[in-house]
């Protein structure tokens, strides 16, 4: 037995080579793929155990068979599988919660090799933070893309084809967990939506471990918190019809009846009182009105709505073969350049990075991906933020020839000196991955984030798209209404500063949440130093 334990430690310590890199799983789909193979190994180990104890562990056998089919499909295309946010959420939930239940079930019978393996593996499983992060991602996608709970729970998200092999559905337990996550954030709007969805599925006689009474308890309270006394009272009465001795519901019933009578008296029992049920779309509209104007613009652009170029401005945008003023390298092989927007000028370069180069960049970055950070506008300190959900890694030019070649290509095409630029940053977005509106350049009213570099402000941004995204994931500019869709193998470029050195505030941009798919990007931030004779100031200070 001692030999077996040592062997298990040696075997499973190799599954996740850099455990320190695997926190915040939900922030990078690229790293989450390791979890699928880990889960597949656990299923195999579990099935071996079942062969010895099949008669006593029939429940465990059924669980393993279900997971075996799921992981077999998932590991054929890990990133595609996790590109569906429902699959990513359910993976977090299974590994953080449900595998623990399996462990408890097996422990009641005997402790054998499978338990040793599972116990070792669980040290590297997603945490409560990962499960909560994945749940919040689904709620974020629900709001940004105006999705209803039925659409999400059936897995029929925009962009999902009918023959998709790994489409998942949410069970009543899953919906209940989403509702509880919202409740823990005092988000009663989403609590109501997901508890109501759980109740609908339970009313359809779906077999579930979720207690209808618990669902009704959360549902009635969340509705009450939104000021709808009549509906809260209705669900409380239904709860008490199932559990007459429910202490909290009994107290709530009396309180709701008292408050409703008081309200009706004050309103003179007129129609349209504050206690009357509101239309859900009206409540959603009221909720949206609390958002900042920029938030509304940002979400509209993510959905493909919002501002558009006028026909006159559109007519001034062109596609061309570009050689950067007859650069020797591009005279015979110019690049394909397309105008995406006029003010600020945003251009896209098509087929600018090869498949082989993209795969090498991902390969170099993946082991070093860490939770992306932002610079605190007050202190200047780097920190994680809920509005930037991704992981990133930095690649220096001397690490591999492909990085050096890419840097040189950026310099040749833009005409800017990249020796003072930051290292190539590679980012992979997680479940509902996003980066809300921000500037790439440093403003005068905040600490100089680039002072230590000694290379000045970020004059320009070059952004490679290293994957296609089935739905969502666009780069949008809320100030001007521009929206640039990810296109694998292409890159977009824009200046963050005017020739005078002043910041161009119209370049404020955002990465929309990834609704379906896996988003890989890499970017190069080019700095002011070295550009003095490459991008000259004009004679007018206002330029």
Image: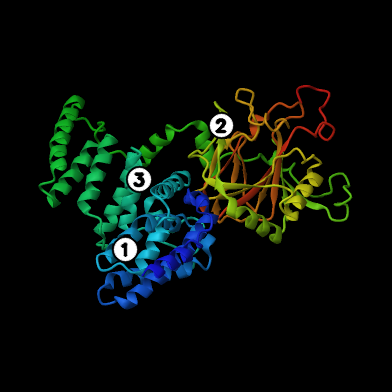
Task: Please state if 117 lies on the left or on the right of 317 as rendered.
Answer: left
How are the residues colored?
rainbow
Determine the CA span between mark 2 and mark 1.
43 Å
Do the residues under discs 2 and 1 have CB atoms within 8 angstroms? no
Q: Quadrant of the N terminus?
A: bottom left
The image shows residue 225 at horizontal and vertical percentages of 27, 35
Name which residue lies at 87% across and 44% down. 325
Kindly identify which residue carries mark 2: 381
Do the residues under discs 1 and 3 have CB atoms within 8 angstroms? no
Q: How many marks?
A: 3
The image shows residue 426 at horizontal and vertical percentages of 63, 49
The image shows residue 155 at horizontal and vertical percentages of 42, 59
| Label drawn at residue 301 | none
Please tell me whether mark 1 or mark 3 is closer to you in this view. Answer: 1
The image shows residue 54 at horizontal and vertical percentages of 29, 76
Position of 275 relative to 323 (above/below):
above
Determine the CA span between mark 1 and mark 3.
23 Å
Task: Please state if 434 lies on the left or on the right of 350 as rendered.
Answer: left
Label 3 sits on a secondary structure element that is helix
Residue 468 in view (yes/no)? yes
Label 2 sits on a secondary structure element that is loop
Label 1 sits on a secondary structure element that is helix
The residue nearer to you, when weighing 42 against 227, is 42
Badge 2 or badge 1: first in the primary sequence = 1
Kindly identify which residue carries mark 3: 181
Do the residues under discs 3 and 2 have CB atoms within 8 angstroms? no
Name which residue lies at 63% across and 58% down. 363
Determine the CA span between mark 3 and mark 2.
29 Å
Kindly identify which residue carries mark 1: 102
Badge 3 or badge 2: first in the primary sequence = 3
Please tell me whether mark 3 or mark 2 is closer to you in this view. Answer: 2
């Amino acid at each position: 037995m001692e030999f077996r334990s040592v062997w298990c430690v040696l075997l499973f310590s190799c599954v996740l080579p850099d455990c320190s890199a695997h926190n915040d799983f939900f922030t990078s789909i690229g790293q989450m793929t390791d979890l699928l193979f880990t889960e597949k190994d656990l299923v195999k180990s579990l099935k071996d155990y079942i062969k010895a104890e099949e008669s006593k562990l029939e429940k465990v056998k059924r669980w393993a068979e279900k997971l075996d089919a799921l992981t077999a499909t998932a590991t054929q295309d890990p990133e595609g599988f996790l590109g569906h946010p429902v699959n990513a959420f359910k993976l977090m939930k299974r590994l953080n919660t449900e595998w623990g239940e399996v462990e408890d079930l097996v422990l009641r019978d005997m402790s054998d090799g499978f338990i040793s393996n599972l116990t070792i593996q669980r040290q590297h499983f997603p945490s409560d933070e990962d499960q909560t992060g994945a749940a919040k991602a689904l709620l974020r996608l629900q709001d940004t893309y105006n999705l209803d709970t039925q659409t999400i729970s059936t897995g029929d998200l925009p962009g999902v084809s009918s023959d998709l092999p790994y489409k998942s559905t949410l069970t009543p337990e899953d919906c209940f967990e989403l509702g509880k996550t919202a409740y823990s954030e005092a988000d009663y709007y989403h609590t109501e939506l997901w508890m109501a969805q759980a109740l609908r599925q339970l009313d359809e006689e779906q077999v579930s471990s979720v207690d209808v009474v618990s669902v009704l308890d959360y549902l009635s309270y969340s509705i009450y918190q939104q000021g709808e006394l009549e509906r809260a009272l209705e669900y409380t009465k239904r709860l008490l019809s199932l559990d007459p001795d429910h202490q909290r519901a009994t107290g709530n019933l009396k309180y709701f009846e008292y408050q409703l009578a008081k309200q009706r008296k004050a309103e003179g029992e007129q129609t349209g009182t504050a206690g009357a049920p509101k239309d859900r779309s009206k409540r959603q509209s009221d909720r949206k009105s609390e958002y900042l104007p920029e938030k509304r613009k940002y979400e509209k652009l993510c959905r493909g709505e919002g501002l558009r170029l006028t026909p006159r401005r559109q007519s001034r945008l062109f596609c061309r073969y570009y050689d950067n003023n007859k650069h020797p390298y591009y005279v015979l092989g110019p690049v394909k350049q397309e105008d995406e927007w006029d003010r600020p000028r945003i251009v896209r370069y098509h087929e600018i990075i090869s498949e082989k180069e993209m795969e090498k960049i991902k390969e170099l970055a993946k082991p070093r991906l860490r939770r992306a950070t932002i610079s605190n506008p007050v202190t200047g300190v780097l920190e994680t933020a809920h509005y930037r959900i991704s992981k990133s890694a930095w690649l220096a030019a001397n690490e591999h020839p492909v990085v050096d070649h890419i840097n040189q290509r950026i310099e040749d095409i833009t005409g800017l000196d990249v020796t003072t630029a930051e290292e190539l940053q590679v980012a992979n977005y997680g479940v509902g991955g996003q980066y809300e509106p921000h500037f790439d350049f440093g403003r005068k009213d905040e600490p100089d984030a680039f002072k230590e570099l000694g290379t000045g402000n970020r004059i320009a941004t070059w952004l490679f798209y290293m994957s296609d995204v089935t739905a969502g994931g666009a780069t949008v500019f809320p100030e001007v209404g521009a929206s640039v869709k990810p296109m694998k193998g292409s890159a977009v470029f824009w200046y963050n500063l005017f020739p005078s050195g002043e910041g161009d505030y119209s370049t404020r941009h955002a990465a929309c949440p990834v609704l379906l798919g896996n988003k890989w990007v890499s970017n190069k931030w080019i700095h002011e130093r070295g550009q003095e004779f490459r991008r000259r100031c004009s004679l007018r200070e206002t330029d």
